[in-house]
Amino acid sequence: MIYREAGQFKTSYAADQSIFPIRLDRWGMLATLFVAFFVIPVVANEYWLLSILVPFLVFSLAAIGLNILTGYAGQLSLGTGGFMACGAFAAYKLSTAFPEMNILIVFLLSGAVAAAVGVLFGLPSLRIKGFYLAVATLAAQFFLIWMFNKFGWFNNYSPSGVISAPPRALFGDFYVTGASASPVAKYLFLLGFVAVMALIAKNLTRCKIGRSWMAIRDMDIAAEIIGIRPLLAKLSAFAISSFFIGIAGAMWAFIYTGSVEALAFDINRSFQVLFMIIIGGLGSILGSFLGAAFIVLLPILLNNVPGLIGWQIPVDMIAHLEFMIFGALIIFFLIVEPHGLARLWQIAKEKMRLWPFPY
């Protein structure tokens, strides 16, 4: 009975169009942020911070970027891994060429480099769409990974082809990359950055540019007739999506792994992020977080739950079960609920709002 909209009056259009129009939703979000920023750093150990929460946040940022392009703008992309590699190698070149540059600026500039590359490979979207656009972005994926492996300039001519994140501080002695960075510092920096980027993405989808993306997604010819420019809408979606994905790639290399090679961003990485937005929910910022949480937690559950209940499952069988579950869930959500876990959560909230009279 407490989750009800009755009695909550709005006195302005801004209040009526807010992200969280129901008071309990605002309280729930504030409570979630309080737990994330103040409780988890105190109670979580190093394994939870570095092996679960940090990759979850990085994947969430990458999923938000792909969701902007595929979920909101309707442009299917299989080049996510390549754009993540662009961000990672751009951050490496910037941090080594300009040692005094703040790491936050390095991440933002690496996203800008990835955005420029995304616009370049997004040009075919002006003439092709659907499966053919997916093939074009797949070509970008293979080309970018080949380029980073072929030319030693991108990794400063390292014999192994591996780039290592130099130690960088956000301010003072608050190191967020390198061996000097503590797990709590990495987590808090990444959490704050992802929270701000998620808020920016949510507001982008609610403004004029977001409405143009959704109009292009639903019917591009009708959108052009009513005055929306497909060139601006599609290329802006590619640019902003690649910006988010590029920063995610830079944070994957600098904060999560500390060192990485180009093959870490192969086609499997692109499919992994695509699975996140399909399972979590296309066209939903919340769905990006839900899908990332599912993809990160499922292997951990498959490795630990069978042992807790007395089942002895070989390691190779667990890896195969992971792919089987992913495939089955993708088929399930595409048939039963195309909008994924986010839509199921929305339905549950609607039932609570209308109880006991669900009409």
Image (cartoon, helix red, strand yellow):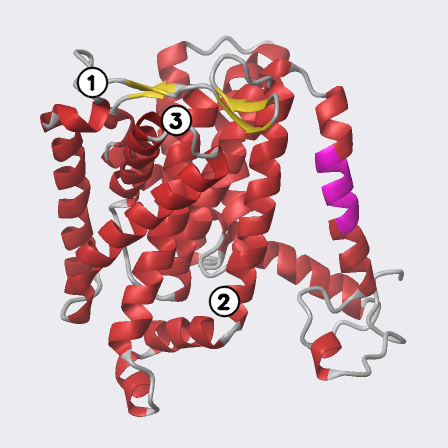
In the picture, the disc for residue 62 is: none
Callout 1–callout 3 Cβ contact below 8 Å: no
- Going from N to C along the chain, the mark reached first, 2 or 1, is 1
| Image position of 275 with respect to 220: above or below | above
In this view of the protein, which residue sits in the foreground, 172 or 183? 172
- For label 1, count other residues whose C-alpha is less than 10 Å away and answer few (under 14), some (14-19) or many (20+): many
- Mark 1 — residue? 161
Q: Which mark is residue 99?
A: 3
Check disc 2 and report the residue beneath it.
205
Q: Vertical placement of 43 versus 279: above or below?
A: above
Which quadrant is home to the C terminus? bottom right
Image point 43% across, 73% down: which residue?
209
Amino acid type, mark 1: Gly
Determine the secondary structure under disc 3.
Answer: loop
Report the side of 176 relative to 10 (left or right): left
Which percent across, then down, holds residue 269?
32, 34
Residue 79, percent across and down? 25, 46
- Specify few, some or many for label 2: CA neighbours under 10 Å numbering under 14, 14-19, or 20 or more: many
Say whether marks 2 and 3 touch (CB < 8 Å). Answer: no
Q: Predominant secondary structure in magenta?
A: helix
Q: Amino acid at mark 2?
A: Thr
Residue 42 percent coordinates (x, y): 76, 22
| Residue ID at (64%, 22%) | 184
Q: Is residue 220 above or below residue 255?
A: below
For the residues marked 1 and 3, what is the alpha-carbon distance in whole angstroms? 21 Å
Looking at the image, the residue that sits furthest to the left is 150
277 vs 224, nearest the viewer? 224
In the current view of this chain or complex, which residue is farthest to the front?
100
Q: What's drawn in magenta, residue-wise? A: 30-37
